[in-house]
Amino acid sequence: MLNRASSFWARLDWITVGVYFLLVFLGWLNIYAAVYDQDHQNIFDISQKYGMQLLWIGASVILIIMIFLVDSRFYAAFPYPIYALVLILLLLVLAFGKEVNGAKSWIDLGLIRLQPAEFAKLSTALALAKFTSTYNFKLLKFRNLLIVGAIMFTPSLLILLQNDTGSALVYSSLILVLYREGLPGWVLVLLAFIVILFILTLLHGVGTVAFIILGLMLLYYYFNARDFRTSLIAFGILLIAYSIPYAFNYFEWFSIPTNLLIIVPFVFASIIFVYFAYRKNINRIYSIVGITLLSLMFILTVDYGFNNVLIQHQRDRINNLLGIEFDPLGAGYNVNQSLIAIGSGGFSGKGYLQGTQTKYDFVPEQSTDFIFCTVGEEWGFLGTSSILLLFTFLLIRILIIAERQKSSFTRIYAYGVASIFFFHLIINVGMTIGLAPVIGIPLPFFSYGGSSLWAFTILLFILLRLDVSRDQLLN
Amino acid sequence: MPVNNQNSDKQWVIGGIFIVLVLIFLIRLFYIQVWDNAYQLTAESNSQRHVTQYPARGLILDRNGKVLVQNQAAYDLMVVPKQVQEFDTLEFCKMLSITNKELKEKLKKAKLYSWYKPSIFLKQVSFEDYATFQEHLFRFPGFFVQTRTLRDYPMPTATHLLGYVGEVSEKQIENNSYYNLGDYIGISGIEKTYEQELRGTKGNKIFLVDVHNRIKGEFRDGDFDIMAIPGYNITTTIDAELQLFGEQLMEYKIGSIVAIEPSTGEILALISAPSYNPAMLVGRARSLNYSHLQNDSLKPLFNRALTAQYPPGSIFKIINGLIGLQGQFINWHTHFTCDKSLVGCHNHPTNDNIEKAIQFSCNPYFFQTYKKIIQQGKDNNRFIDSRYGLTYWRNYVLEFGLGKKLKSDLPNISSGSIPDTTFYDKWYGKERWAFSNIASNSIGQGEVMVVPIQMANLVAIIANKGYYITPHVVKKVGEKTNANPEFLTIHPTSIDTKWFETVQNAMYAVVNEAHGTAGRARIDSIAVCGKTGTVQNPHGEDHSVFIAFAPKDNPQIAIAVYVENSGFGGTWAAPIASLMIEKYINGEISEYNTKYKQQRILDYKPLYVEPSK
């Protein structure tokens, strides 16, 4: 027994444990700074947020010990019941939950309030690992893809129903896990392409993007046929086909719907393209025409969906992020204040507790969603880059842990953990520096809140517990 | 080789995505934090200063649109302790004429409130001090001046009615998040009742200020500013000229006048004497003046018209007579001998009927009437019979708006009191009292207590021949007519109109016929109806009371006048009432009445003290 215990401590990944405690400590320091005022300086004052956070950190240590006491095989054996339990909790929240800041995501237990959505990430990562790690598992089988999709998006949907869009989007990060486990790379590229099309459409309008797509199609033709003359002719015809309806609109002779503006040149261009391509014997012309058609339909859908399906505040946030409309009283105010706070920190910051922007109303939610502003203002670029690098170190460390597992269950779970941390980091920090929409998800270990701290702690330490048994087969 | 571990080279792609995105973030952070110093400048310029925009408080006008209350500008010196740096305290104190000690105390107080939020350092700096200080403001970081408005009274009248504004108390701040430390709130009168309508809504203006505390411009071109919404103007029912005239008549006297338009319940004038100038409770002198007024033995802060409770005196005989007539205990022709063994009386011709009895204010007549009402013979036991009678009588009395608070829009109205069986049970013990114990109610000297505004309302009921609309003082809020349903509702009495006609005839006789008790209220051109009252005062000379309405056929004004310690009602109260009526209906006092009646009143100055040399 002694041997086993000592081997436990020997095999525990102390580097990760160290990074964890460092992050938690830094997080607490910043919460203290964010709500600091002259009247309440006692760090144990639980009427203040930093006092409460200290309490939750203490509870986290107890949680860690409990996680370590449980055998690794337990985590590998019971993902489904845990998953089911959390789903029930999510349903309960929908039925009896308490509404805070417009999101109905809290269960009030009197003494403490829990946010089941935080724990759903854990259960989903576990269940996904369990399912994907079955012997001889083929991800690309239709049935498997369907089940994987269900595991990922059922909790996501329930959380979306709670009106907590941010937490629901976290599950999309698990696509990285699937990529690691066999999803072809072109899917990621396609997703990236879709996101870029989406952003470009909103930024520059349907007409411009359609023009770019058609241009790309001709470029493809040129590179395949090496026929500069016909390419130029085709481009010229396209330009004319494109500009005639534009001219009609511009001179207000009569108004042509935007959709027609795109479809007419597309039909023209397609005919020319197919004709030349056919003559030059270029392969895959039909799939190229198909992709172009799909892209055009996509941008039309985006345009329609954005203007007719999304709710105003979602539109505002996206608009604001893309810099289309400046709406100072809406989401823009927060990001603007956040940028001022972080920007004012300069290279080395104003010094601990010396921040003025993050205190007193300038930055909203300064202890939760916008805690990174405090880091930026008081510790400057040195602080923000250190924190980012520390997180990156943690992420890479998790990847290293993942790849040294004998059991694929642990590996897949590890990728899940890394993806979730990564998503939170990118979105949370991204929104404070104007690179991501303001969707309000916590920065792990930094944002104030017990549920979030516990959820990330459990997520990470179950991985460390599994890692201790990395030479065993747990599937 | 681990089981099922294909694709392991994908770890490099995933790790690569992590690192690339973090690199993008690092570049972005470097850009906003180090490269681009625009954000730094925005924040370093000490960022924003939120300045509350105080809305102009609504004006208060009289019924003809004359301004009674308006606003004047005032300057508060504010401080944000966190931003205060070392400065020349000597010069600072000299400029604002405060001592070094005061400066320290005030700074300490501000820090105690908040380090970051602005608080008032010095209230209502004079315009001259403000002008000098404004030029030197940049040398005192952390200080700035906030403009707000104070009340101003172009016509120093109707003090009690208008009320005054003062700073909110801590408790009010706790209960209502609208208010902040140093805000003003209506404390009495119309300012209190119509606080919500008058105050408007505060706005907020955001300025960018630099390290020297100089305003650099609007934040985001004022897009974040919230404009203050001015309060509504309040049009009162008061006739300012009548009010002012009444106040002049009441100078150097103690008492009150309430005048009501009977058909609408609108209060035309409401005077409580002694009074004070409303401007005394404005500005920095406020607290000093307030304590002076509070310690004054004549209680000028006390609104006698709404809160002073007196026995009604002889005027109450009208109500007892009406109840007697309605209950058929007496009729128009009823005659009671003026039997002075029952209760004292003065010498007067015989009471041939109820009209004469009211005209001569015969005490024994109403003693008998009241006896019939109380002892109806419903029970052989006179104690039980009296209980029944008292309840019967009281139900009628309450219909006249007595014994309860009128639901007016003036705060702090007293209810007066109409004794009930419980009251006498407590006093004498159950079934240990009968008519003989409560007989003095018959002539209004017993346990009945009435407030002047109720008395005026009683006259309105008589003028209206049987109903009243709750007296109120606000006609319009903004451009809208006061929509309070209470002020549109008719409160009827269950007494027949014809009996009110009888009372009106008697009251006409009181003023206009020989042997009436109020010949001094007669006006040649106006048919005045009135009734005198003399309230016995155990502490000194009796109070003089007179009620009246006019003209008889189309009453436009109902009035009650109280003059304390001035004896018989006909002597002082009656001529004051008649002057008020003449002023309101004719717009001016006839030459003859000015010379004799008005001058006589103005010369009567029981409170006048010869100024010592």
Image (tube, rainbow, N blue to C red):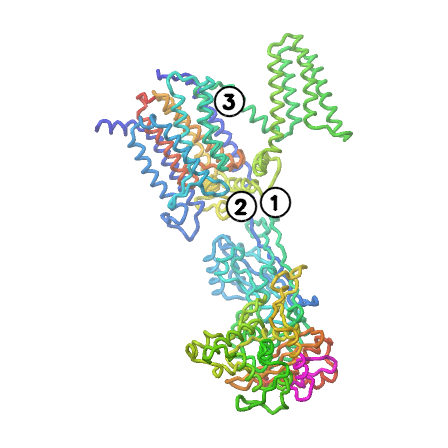
- Residue bearing the label numbered 3: A188
Residue B514 shown in magenta: yes
Q: Which residue is at the front of the view, B66 or B70?
A: B66
Density class for disc 2 (Cα within 10 Å; few <14, some 14-19, many ≥20) is some
The residue under label 1 is B220
Q: Residue furthest left?
A: A2
Residue B525 in the image: above or below residue A89 = below
A475 horizontally vs B492: left or right? left
Disc 1 versus disc 3: nearer the observer: 3
Query: Which residue: 36% across, 40% down?
Result: A57
The segment highlighted magenta reads B504-529
> Dot 3 falls on which chain?
A
Per the model, the C-alpha gap separating discs 3 and 2 is 43 Å
Q: Residue furthest right?
A: A253
The correct choice, above or below, for A331 with respect to A241 in the image is: below
Q: Is residue B38 placed above or below B485 in the rendered structure?
A: above
Disc 1 + disc 3, Cβ < 8 Å: no
Residue B162: image quadrant is bottom right
